[in-house]
Amino acid sequence: MAMTTVDQLQAHASSLEKRRRLYTVLGAVVFAFLVVMGFIGAEEMNSGGFVQGLSKFFDYPSNIVAETHNAGLGWFERLWVYLPALFETINMAAVATIFGTVFAVCLSFASTRGLGVWPPIIPVARRIMDITRAFPELILALFLIFMLGSSPVPAIIAVAFHTAGALGKLFSEVNENIDRGPLEGMTAAGASWSKRMRWAVLPQVLPNYTSYMLLRFEINIRASAILGFVGAGGIGTELRKAISWANGADIAALFVLLFLTIMVIDQISGHVRRRLVGGMFVGAR
């Protein structure tokens, strides 16, 4: 009886496996059919075909490299010329990160259970973070540029707005994982809410807060550069002009500056984050 039951189970498992494989093959066929039909539809809608355009795919990068080579040693002067635009982009990202982090800290404390905040404010703070994360920086910047005009201010507001929601969500998760012992001890001793947050919560969460803020600063530099394309200033605006004028040497200089900046900041912030998360700074005190 037991053998019969095992054989039945094996037969049932084999049947399920065959059915799973059949569904997988059918799903792959349907997916391939949709991809091919979508590709054919895109070919018909575009002014030029994909296959015809594929041969020209490397023409534009080749022209940029050729113009950069033809510029000779004078090309390096372009790096110096575009440095102010790069600094403007970094300043936009830094200001947006600072303001966004301040709002994120407030939202994270207001949205975390168990910290002694007024309960009705918790869902309100969480929905505010959802709303700020839902709006992409580019859409919000376009809306603000329409109202305030072309300047770095709309980009700073847009990036700070999104940073507040993104960091607030991460900060609130950090708050929920703290050790409750110090908080309960200070509560039992009659400490005020501000003192409990200052001495029982902040020492535990600050290393992770700083780590997330540095990571967000790196992301905000890229976002600020992209917003320059829509009139927010900085290196993105210069890159848009260079692309519009098809000036390959300038495009290469701007890409090199942006790449080097992001690489340097990524290395520095990664080094600081590793030390903070590893607790070396805390241990050195």
Image: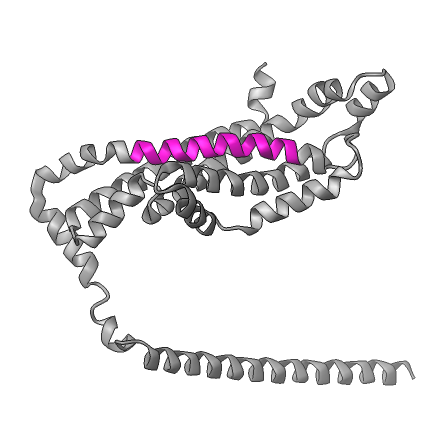
Q: Residue furthest right?
A: 1
User: Magenta segment, principal secondary structure?
Assistant: helix
Residue 252 seen in render = yes
Task: Determine the residue positioned at 13% across, 47% down.
Answer: 68
Tell me the magenta residue range: 86-107
In front of the other: 104 or 230: 230
**Residue 149 rendering spot, x and y as whole percentages:** 37, 42
Which quadrant holds residue 224?
A: top left
Task: Determine the residue positioned at 9% across, 38% down.
Answer: 73
Position of the N terminus by quadrant: bottom right
**Residue 105 rendering spot, x and y as whole percentages:** 62, 31
**Residue 136 rendering spot, x and y as whole percentages:** 49, 51
Residue 273 seen in render = no
> Would residue 188 be found to the left or right of residue 139 on screen?
right
Which quadrant holds residue 8?
A: bottom right
**Residue 151 rendering spot, x and y as whole percentages:** 35, 38
Q: Is residue 123 above or below residue 1?
A: above
In front of the other: 149 or 160: 149
Task: Determine the residue positioned at 74% across, 39% down.
Answer: 122
> Would residue 66 be found to the left or right of residue 126 on screen?
left
Asked if residue 241 is among those painted magenta in the image, a careful observer would answer no
In front of the other: 60 or 159: 159
> Would residue 64 be found to the left or right of residue 111 on screen?
left
Task: Determine the residue positioned at 53% across, 50% down.
Answer: 135
> Would residue 54 be found to the left or right of residue 190 on screen?
left
